[in-house]
Image: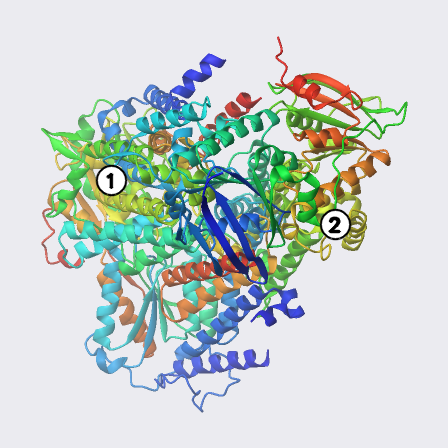
């Protein structure tokens, strides 16, 4: 037992040493100036770094972070969205000369696995942790530990609203609600005439891979609310049916019987492509469906898979169903180029990854940082080549 | 009673009952949902059925030997990820990727066979281990990332046409033809070749089969190799039908295939079963998965109902047998 | 070698278990040497977090496997228990203590369901667990309206249940888990229930013809399993806070692996609670060590698979030599 | 008797810790039936396994058709013409008769197995043996006797020159044994060498030409059958004399009360309207051919299988027995014909098996009282003279006879008044058999009522006080031991029922 206590104290001391910014990666001996009994310093980040703060880490990285190591934990590796984020992280790390270690669970649903990884990352005592949390609540305890140990955390992709004060230094995330609305804003005008001229109710389908994570649900609700708002502005009534969560949490669920526009929300039992495809094909198969929205890469690809059989998607509202997607990847990009998919909203995972490392380095250098909101950009076949869009379209 | 029974058993006993269940489900869904009656729906169901059906054909062999193969689900994903990784990331030609996929599947099948037959491990455990191993290997091969095999229209997407071609704007479910052909082929193998005969013999009485001077080791291994190989075929079907293969998935596919086989009349204790039966059993599961959304049920209700139908399908059989023996 | 095995102390503890224990210790040493910061309490605590719920699952499934059956629904049922009780807690304001009871009750109910079908209807355990896996996922999802449920944080007054896992740095959970392991061991080895469960796993018909109501005892094995799964749910949320509907199957294999690694025979009739406990610790430590060495979880799965193969192979050959 | 076809000389074989065979000699001539005898564990089966290549011998020579040979597996032995018909039937229940006969050497058309030709060939074989079996029938649908015939047909189809019968009659009824003997005599005429392993003395006298006796892995001697008596052979086997004389008259005291009365019991095809009474202290023999419904009757009484109708009275009280649990509560114990499957739990100890039916008595509060359990097990180990190193021994390590004693102990611990012994001595060697008989007599003297189902006529005649005969699910006769003779019983057992 004695040994364990000693080990704990030693590691605490080590953390303190590292944070004090002496930059020494030697794990062997705690620096003499950090007495073993010193409590993990909560105020450590406030301490001035011994090393001179780098002026612009982005511009002059090599000098800045030579010895820093960061742990980056993504939500999963399932979609190329995360591949792009990891690429961004690695690029920036190389540029700044810092060490990063990227991990992530196999699936976004493996919450417990991610908590284990986070705990592990904390135990490895890095200079900072970049976290894309699968769940807003599951990480709170670990964040408290990180805070106690003085390890700064930067959230990316998704924020953690209830995080203990001071644990999360900055959040690099997209406003998902707004991004979902962006999709509606771009899809609605294309369908506007058809909705206006329709004699019977028309249907808009939405496929969400789940109804639990903040990012997916916000996008889904953002789309629903915006679409409903635009339709009502044109004097149409809207009803939302399908998955209970989305129906109950949208602004106005309306009445299916009397509605002109029905938004149907489908959520598969698990976040796999084949189940998303099954759900999507049911909606695509309905005669009154005119539009579809898939709120992330898996869901959007599910819609495209379903269309392989049905062949109802296209860009002409008169003869086909228009589908909007989310995120990029070769499948979605290909579908947009070939006119199967009307368009999609992309975030900038590459930039998000880069920014995360940049901010972590800044924190380690003792600079103050603030949240960096990233955006969702609408893209379709017309603007895919634009300079503002193209860099965000990863494979 | 006596006559009725003989008619049913001549038609294949449980197989026949399960076929009725399939027809019943189709009629029910068509009656309730007009969308279900569309040709495109048939296409979706078939698309969805290929990989489960292929796995079920393969896994019927280990099941008949009295074993089981739990590694086919995660194996499928592992093989598909490996092949896809080589094609997409390493720029290999598609045929080479497919070849590697199949070779890997045969290797894992061989490994299962050796563990079970030579090292004498309980099949359930041996394949549980390879299930974990393939799940890990798949992610490692693909470096943890999801892989999209070439999409339709893209160069190298010819393999998708194996399962579905478009003639004059109509999609033809070619894959179903292959599945049927494979069912006929494997039914022949099971009933009319040495491999099949000895597979049944091992499941019936392994000791006696050894004493008959048969190289039981070889044929026992073959059962698992067949199962592995069909998981490989299923991997190609899965990659051809669905866009992205995600690492970490696949656990659970094997339960659908094995469940289908057992519903289709394969004896859980070995020695008895048929390929046709397994195929019919698989369709019960596929119909439930693809049909229930059409009657407006949310995914969660679908799961509950699938569970209940599974139990009842087996219970009907148990009650029938109880009546017969009484 | 033979002489070591004949040593009364070794015999009492079981040779295989001693080997397993050594594997556990060696692994710890190895990780401590190769990964900086590995030795020390935080890693152990973190590994234990994983060991608790997995351990209860393993203990539960040990009883089922002892009867010669199998339960694939333990993971999803654990999630179902945690979701239903958690939803009662967060949405209907049910007090925490009662929610914990609900969690155990839900697990037990699934045990009753599985056990009834297996014992009284002779439905193959494989089919039963497949069905109840689907049903558990479905019910949990319907009940929570497809929402994930987050249990209260440790800092809130309702978070007291987290002290079941640890108070400060003291691993209370370990004490509780070991206590349950001892109870399970007593049930299995010293009571009628255990005797009949093991015997019917070995030869059902002989036990039935001895005038024993085997259906009752077989069902009891599933009920014990269900109850332990319900408890596992509590330890899962106490360590990991959030559960999501539609999942849980990923823990089946690991729980079964832990149980089998410890010497419980898949064919039924032989079970070792002590072995199960060590098996679970090995898996949990492996998970922690693999992460610490900056490998992904995939390697843990592969290594676990290999260890099980080796452990079972050793067992099989040992038994063959005996005969 | 023709020339010597097979000679085994000085065969030695050791297993870790055991010398199973020690310099054993054995020879077979063309056109003879050569019995190989010895108690269980004497090494008969091991010797045959060495011959057919299942085991590798340590030393000694095997000369077959004038050449020294060594087979590495059964297949090699088969193709050379040495075939074994196993004691435990080697059938593949899910395959058809023809498929079983030709397993491992199917006729083929390309890669396809030619089932049609196999059926024809099988038919030819059966015609040659004068057996009427449909080659396309599924094996598990045949009776044990017919399955045995298939095994023989299979052996002959190998162009066998030497056929080894390993306890062929163990599972057969008298009539089926008759048929078997006819076939064996036929084969003998065709100049085949036949090795016949059996425990049954009367059969040896009837069918064999020479007898080789083994004891404890060693060769004792070879006799010409017609020149020796039963007792000569038995003496060579065990070194002591055993008499197998029929019981002269009933040992049941006059006016012994009826403890069990069964009236109009019906349970499926195999149990039709069976009624009988069982008295205190009586051994009631149940005789009949295989498949006559005796075991089924016992199982129905015991509640192991469902019954359709019929009343059971115990000590005059009508009782309801739907499960074995009910039966045990009524004081009935059942010793199954198939100990391994229905009698013992092999992975449990002697003590644990002994209390299997009585565990609630040995439970204190929540826990099993292991001391009391061991004590009672020890008591019965002593009183039944069970050979076991301790009560903690796993039952799997005991011999057949001792396993049977453990099963008996299980019911004695329960203090059952009615015991049903179903084929109590099947697969048990002569010495142990005698002990079981003594034990049954002792139990009857103590006032237990015993139903004994047996297919061995000598056993029935030796043990029973009264005999019930069944045929095709019906009771066809009931006679006291005084009037009983083999012929009368056989007559009843084969009686055609209108």
Quadrant showing the N terminus of chain A: bottom right
Residue at image x 65%, y 28%? Answer: D295
Quadrant showing the C terminus of chain A: bottom left
- Residue A283 visible to an observer of this rendering: no
Residue D324's spot in the image, x, y percent? Answer: 70, 32
Q: Residues within 10 Å of mark 2 (few under 14, many from 20)?
A: many
Chain containing the residue with disc 2: D
Residue A254's spot in the image, x, y percent? Answer: 35, 31
Left/right placement of residue D131 relative to residue A194 reads right
Outermost residue, top side: D498
In this view, the residue in front, A33 or B204, is B204
- Residue D245 visible to an observer of this rendering: yes
Residue B189's spot in the image, x, y percent? Answer: 29, 36
Q: Between label 2 and label 1, give the one nearer the viewer.
A: 2
Secondary structure, mark 1, is helix
Q: By what rule are the colours in the image chosen?
A: rainbow
Using the numbered discs, state the Cα–Cα distance from disc 2 to disc 1 in whole angstroms. 74 Å
Disc 2: which residue: D386
Quarter occupied by residue C296: bottom left
Disc 1: which residue: A303
Image height check: is A38 above or below A157?
below
Q: Residues within 10 Å of mark 1 (few under 14, many from 20)?
A: many
Residue at image x 78%, y 37%? Answer: D440
Chain containing the residue with disc 1: A
Quarter occupied by residue A357: bottom left
């Amino acid at each position: 037992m004695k040994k364990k206590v000693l080990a704990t104290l030693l590691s605490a001391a080590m953390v303190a040493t590292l944070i004090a910014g002496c930059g020494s990666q030697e794990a062997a001996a705690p620096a003499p100036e950090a007495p073993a009994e010193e409590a993990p310093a909560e105020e450590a980040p406030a301490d001035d770094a011994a090393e001179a703060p780098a002026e612009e880490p982005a511009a002059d990285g090599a000098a800045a972070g030579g010895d820093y190591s960061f742990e980056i934990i993504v939500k999963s590796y399932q979609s190329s969205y995360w591949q792009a984020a990891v690429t961004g992280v690695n690029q920036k790390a190389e540029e700044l000369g810092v060490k990063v270690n990227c991990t992530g669970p196999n699936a976004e649903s493996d919450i417990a696995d991610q908590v284990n990884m986070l705990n592990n990352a904390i135990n490895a005592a890095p200079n900072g942790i970049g976290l894309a949390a699968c769940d807003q609540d599951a990480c709170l305890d670990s964040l408290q530990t990180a805070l106690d140990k003085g390890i700064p955390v930067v959230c990316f992709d998704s924020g953690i609203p209830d995080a203990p004060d001071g644990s999360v230094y900055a959040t690099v995330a997209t406003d998902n609600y707004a991004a979902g609305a962006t999709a509606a804003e771009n899809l609605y005008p294309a369908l506007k005439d058809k909705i206006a001229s329709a004699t019977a109710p028309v249907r808009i389908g939405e496929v969400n891979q789940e109804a639990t994570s903040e990012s997916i649900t916000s996008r889904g609700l953002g789309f629903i609310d915006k679409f409903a708002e635009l339709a009502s502005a044109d004097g149409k009534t809207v009803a939302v049916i399908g998955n209970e969560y989305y129906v109950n949490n949208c602004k106005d669920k309306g009445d299916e019987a009397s509605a002109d526009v029905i938004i149907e929300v489908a959520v598969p039992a698990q976040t796999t492509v084949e189940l998303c495809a099954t759900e999507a094909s049911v909606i695509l198969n309905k005669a009154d469906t005119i539009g579809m929205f898939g709120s992330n890469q898996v869901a959007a690809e599910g819609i495209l898979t379903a269309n392989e059989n049905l062949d109802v998607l296209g860009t002409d509202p008169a003869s086909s169903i228009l589908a909007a997607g989310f995120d990029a990847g070769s499948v979605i990009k290909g579908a947009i180029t070939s006119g199967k998919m009307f368009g999609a909203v992309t975030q900038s995972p590459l930039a998000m990854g880069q920014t995360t490392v940049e901010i972590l380095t800044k924190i380690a250098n003792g600079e103050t940082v603030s949240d960096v909101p990233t955006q969702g950009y609408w893209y379709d076949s017309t603007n895919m080549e634009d300079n503002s869009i193209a860099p965000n379209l990863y494979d | 009673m006596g006559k009725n029974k003989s008619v049913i058993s001549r038609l294949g006993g449980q197989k026949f009952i399960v076929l009725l269940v399939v027809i019943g489900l189709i009629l029910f869904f068509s009656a309730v949902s007009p969308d279900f009656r569309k040709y495109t729906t048939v296409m979706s169901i078939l698309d969805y059925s290929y990989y489960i059906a292929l796995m079920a054909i393969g896994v019927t062999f280990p099941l008949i030997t009295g074993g089981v193969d739990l590694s086919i689900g995660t194996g499928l994903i592992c093989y598909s990820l490996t092949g896809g990784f080589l094609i997409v990331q390493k720029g290999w030609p598609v045929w080479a990727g497919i070849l590697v996929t199949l070779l890997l599947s045969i290797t894992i099948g061989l490994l299962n066979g050796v563990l079970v037959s030579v090292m004498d491990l309980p099949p359930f455990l041996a394949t549980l281990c390879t299930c974990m191993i393939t799940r890990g290997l798949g992610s490692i091969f693909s470096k943890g990332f999801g892989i999209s095999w070439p999409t339709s229209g893209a160069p190298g997407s010819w393999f998708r046409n194996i399962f579905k071609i478009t003639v004059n704007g109509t999609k033809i479910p070619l894959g179903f033809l292959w599945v049927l052909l494979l069912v006929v082929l494997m039914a022949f193998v099971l009933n009319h070749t040495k491999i099949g005969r000895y597979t049944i013999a091992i499941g019936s009485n392994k000791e006696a089969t050894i004493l008959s001077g048969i190289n039981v080791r070889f044929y026992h291994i073959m059962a698992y190799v067949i199962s592995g190989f069909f998981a490989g075929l299923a991997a190609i079907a899965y990659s051809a039908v669905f866009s992205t293969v995600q690492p970490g998935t696949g656990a659970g596919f094997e339960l659908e295939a094995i469940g289908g086989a057992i519903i289709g009349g394969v004896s859980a204790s070995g020695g008895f079963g048929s390929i046709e039966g397994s195929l019919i059993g698989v369709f019960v599961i596929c119909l439930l998965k693809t049909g229930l959304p059409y009657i407006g049920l949310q995914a969660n209700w679908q799961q509950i109902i699938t569970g209940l139908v599974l139990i009842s399908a087996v219970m009907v059989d148990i009650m029938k047998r109880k009546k017969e023996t009484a | 070698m033979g002489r070591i095995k004949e040593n009364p102390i070794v015999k009492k503890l079981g040779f295989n278990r001693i080997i397993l224990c050594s594997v556990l210790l060696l692994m710890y040493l190895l990780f401590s040497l190769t990964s900086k910061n590995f030795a020390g309490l935080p890693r152990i605590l973190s590994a234990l977090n994983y060991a608790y719920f997995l351990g209860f699952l393993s203990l539960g499934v040990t009883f089922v496997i002892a009867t010669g059956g199998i339960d694939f629904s333990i993971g999803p049922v654990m999630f179902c228990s945690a979701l239903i009780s958690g939803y009662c807690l967060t949405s209907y304001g049910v007090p925490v203590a009662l929610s914990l009871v609900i969690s155990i009750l839900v697990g037990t109910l699934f045990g009753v369901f599985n056990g009834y079908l297996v014992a009284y209807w002779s439905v193959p355990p494989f089919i039963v667990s497949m069905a109840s896996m689907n049903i558990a996922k479905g019910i949990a999802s319907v009940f929570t309206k497809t929402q994930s449920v987050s249990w209260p944080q440790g800092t809130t007054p309702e978070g007291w249940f987290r002290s079941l896992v640890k108070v400060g740095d003291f691993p209370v959970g370990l004490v509780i888990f070991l206590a349950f392991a001892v109870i399970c061991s007593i049930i299995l080895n010293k009571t009628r229930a255990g005797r009949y469960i093991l015997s019917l796993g070995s030869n059902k018909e002989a036990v039935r013809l001895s005038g024993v109501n085997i259906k009752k005892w077989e069902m009891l094995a599933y009920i014990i399993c269900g109850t332990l799964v319900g408890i596992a749910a509590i330890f899962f949320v106490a360590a990991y806070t959030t559960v999501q509907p539609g999942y849980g199957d990923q823990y089946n294999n690991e729980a079964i692996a832990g149980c089998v690694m410890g010497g419980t025979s898949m064919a039924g009739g032989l079970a070792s609670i002590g072995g199960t406990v060590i098996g679970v610790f090995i898996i949990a430590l492996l998970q922690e060590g693999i992460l610490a060495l900056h490998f992904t979880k995939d390697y843990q799965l592969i290594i676990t698979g290999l260890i099980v193969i080796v452990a079972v192979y050793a067992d099989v050959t040992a038994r063959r030599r005996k005969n | 008797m023709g020339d010597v076809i097979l000679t085994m000389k000085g065969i030695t074989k050791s297993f870790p810790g055991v010398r199973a065979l020690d310099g054993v000699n054995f020879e077979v001539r063309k056109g003879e039936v050569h019995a190989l005898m010895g108690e269980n564990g004497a090494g008969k089966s091991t010797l045959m396994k060495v011959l057919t290549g299942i085991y590798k011998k340590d030393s000694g020579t095997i000369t077959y058709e004038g050449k020294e040979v060594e087979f590495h597996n059964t297949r090699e032995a088969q193709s050379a013409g040495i075939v074994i018909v196993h004691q435990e039937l080697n059938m593949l229940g899910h395959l058809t008769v023809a498929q079983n006969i030709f397993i491992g050497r199917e006729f083929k058309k390309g890669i396809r197995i030619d089932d049609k030709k196999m059926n024809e060939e099988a038919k030819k074989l059966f015609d040659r043996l004068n057996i009427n079996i449909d080659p396309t029938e599924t094996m598990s649908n045949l009776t044990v006797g017919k399955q045995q015939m298939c095994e023989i047909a299979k052996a002959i189809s190998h162009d066998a020159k030497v056929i080894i019968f390993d306890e062929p009659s163990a599972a057969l009824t008298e009539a089926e044994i008759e048929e078997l003997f006819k076939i064996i005599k036929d084969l003998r005429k065709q100049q085949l060498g036949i090795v016949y392993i059996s425990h049954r003395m009367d059969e040896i006298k009837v069918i064999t030409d020479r007898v080789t006796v083994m004891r404890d892995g060693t060769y004792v001697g070879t006799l010409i059958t017609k020149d020796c008596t039963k007792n000569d052979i038995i003496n060579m086997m065990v070194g002591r004399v055993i008499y197998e004389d029929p019981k002269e008259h009933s040992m049941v005291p006059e006016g012994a009360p009826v403890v069990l009365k069964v009236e109009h019991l019906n349970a499926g095809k195999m149990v039709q309207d069976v009624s009988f009474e069982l008295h205190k202290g009586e051994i009631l023999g149940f005789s009949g051919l295989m498949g006559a419904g005796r075991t089924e009757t016992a199982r129905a009484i015991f509640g192991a299988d469902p019954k359709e109708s019929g009343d059971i009275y115990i000590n005059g009280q009508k009782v309801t027995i739907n499960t074995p649990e009910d039966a045990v509560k009524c004081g009935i114990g059942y010793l199954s014909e198939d100990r391994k499957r229905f009698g013992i739990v092999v992975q449990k100890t002697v003590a644990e098996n002994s209390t299997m039916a009585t565990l609630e008595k040995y439970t204190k509060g929540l826990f099993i009282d292991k001391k009391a359990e061991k004590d009672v097990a020890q008591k019965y180990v002593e009183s039944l003279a069970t050979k076991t190193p301790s009560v903690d021994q796993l039952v799997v390590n005991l011999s057949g006879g001792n396993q049977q004693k453990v099963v008996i102990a299980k019911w004695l611990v329960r203090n059952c008044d009615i015991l049903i012994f179903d084929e109590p001595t099947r697969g048990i060697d002569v010495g142990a058999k005698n002990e079981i008989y003594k034990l049954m007599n002792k139990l009857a003297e103590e006032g237990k009522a015993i139903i004994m189902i047996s297919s061995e006529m000598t056993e029935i005649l030796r043990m029973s006080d009264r005999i019930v005969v069944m045929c095709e699910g019906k009771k066809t006769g009931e006679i006291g031991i005084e009037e009983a003779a083999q012929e009368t019983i056989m007559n009843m057992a084969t009686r055609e029922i209108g």
